[in-house]
Amino acid sequence: MILSTRSFVQKPRWQTLTSNEQQSLNGQVDGGFALKWASPVAIVTTVLMVFGADVVRAALAQTTGKAYSPVCFSFGWVGYALSCWLDVFGDGRLLPPPDHQIKVFNLTSGYHRTNRNWVIGRIARDHELWIRSREPLNDNAIRIAVYEAETNSNGSTSFSWNSLHTSGVCVMILQMIIAAIPTVLTRGQEWGVLVVTGAGTILAMIMGCLPQWTAEKLPPKQTSTNNYALTAGNGSRDIMIIKGGGRCLNLEHLATVDSPWNRRLWARFDSPSSSRRSKLIMGIPGGFVFTIVWVVVQVALWLCLLVFLADLRDRNWYLLLNAAIGFVHNSSLATLKQDPRHRNLPLTLLDAISTRKTMDGLMDLEITHPDCGAETLAHEYFPGKWRDEEYEWWNTAGDRSKTRYDQQRFKESAKRLCPRSMIPRYDLHTVAEPDIKGKTPMIATGGNSRSQHRADGGASDGNTGEPTQFTSHPRPGADSSIERHANEELDDRSDTTSQSIGASENSSRPGTPYSFATPDTGLETAKFTASLSLRPDWD
């Protein structure tokens, strides 16, 4: 007997449902989606686990160093805790890798190192963002900013308070108010959101006050007398030079800071008045042992919070809102540019050099600041074979105004600006502290709305006629013949009879570049930066 196969094939269940059963099933599906949107436990848990770990890490790197850190409860904390576990048991560092790749040049010794410290990378990045608005690069090939380190009022293991800490307090208070709304609305019945927000805030604050953050962000030696240059090297258009003067962080050491597994990193926490040294526990520095213990504990506590979060059924949108507010705040902390004084490196801007050719700028740096090792940077930017006139210039020990290179540049001064070797006198602004013996004034230009430049190159107050803090000094190696030579060349190129070089009145306000030019022709012969408003405000 032949059986039909149709009798053995069963229809799918959904094809045999009655109309009432299909309506009931559709209602259950719709109800499930509605329940998930009403109580987004899965959404909050997933986002807390995966999203935003890098933001939390960068925000902590930016703001830690005090007993309180403004980094708030937000998305990404669980993911950061798990990644921190791997980092601590790996190289041991809490700071992220630098996000701005540069080299650190010790201009005193001539050596350089590739930076591996996040803090130095941010100093260079923030400088470029700040100097861009103050001294636009335009069509110039290079921009060199020369700073001098000021006295750091903080200790060797502490940082200063700033507005970021205040903003963190405000955001934390706002989060706690939002978290308390479900508790108030339900008269104390729903307190899960308040518990999760409060516990997450406490865990975030404890992570931010670990002493290892300070150990990684500050070098052991913080009174360096060396001069440093921060630049990406060949091809970069920005150079940041810092004159130490006995008040600068040792950037060369900080660029390759020791591992937390090494006892040397914790030496700054030792008592200077005794022979007490950081304790070793099973061969590991005590401070690093504390970091390891807390990282393990925080991973366990964050996972416990996730388990607790799974039982929350109502009003979870308040928790999601709190985490979103914290994420926006932490993102702003992670990306905000910060004044270098908040990194224990207060700086004073002395000079800014911008030239159409890179070699011109490096030569002007050598003339104006001979202690800044411009030749070291010249070999970095021009590693190949130099031209004969360039070799001649760098090998000339005395007056360089008569070299072939500067003579040719002077002929093209309308485009390339006059070389500084042919400007025998210019304003100096000394920022050296009087208690530092043997300190030589730093060469930089300065001017304000009330100062008028005298014929001899000095400055006087526009109201009283008394000399201001600016003084005029001859450039080392310059004589009157150079000045006559420069003026004669200018007379040959114009009909003017003026023999002096004066400052442009239109650009004499503090903090802005101005040009030295012949009054009648307007021929730009040199470009400096006014330095009354010397302290950079990078915030």
Image: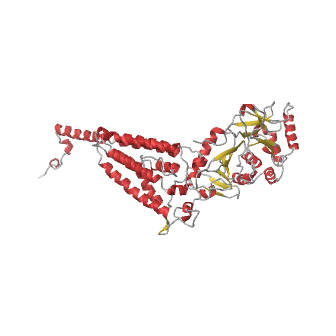
Task: Give the x, y percent position of residue 514.
Answer: 72, 36
Residue found 49% across the figure and 62% down from its top: 288
Whether 369 is drawn above or below 489: the answer is below
Q: How many marks do you count on the picture?
A: 0
Task: Give the x, y percent position of residue 355.
Answer: 72, 42
Camera-side residue of 117 and 138? 117
Colouring style: secondary structure
Q: Can you say which quadrant of the picture contains the C terminus?
A: top right
Whether 264 is drawn above or below 538: the answer is below
Camera-side residue of 300 and 8? 300
Most extreme residue toward the bottom is 282
Task: Give the x, y percent position of residue 509.
Answer: 70, 34
For residue 361, side relative to residue 159 (left or right)? right
Camera-side residue of 392 and 118? 118
Whether residue 319 is visible here, answered yes or no, is yes
Most extreme residue toward the front is 273
Whether residue 423 is visible here, answered yes or no, is no
Task: Give the x, y percent position of residue 518.
Answer: 81, 34
Camera-side residue of 17 and 437? 437
Choose top left, top right, bottom left or bottom right for residue 272: bottom right
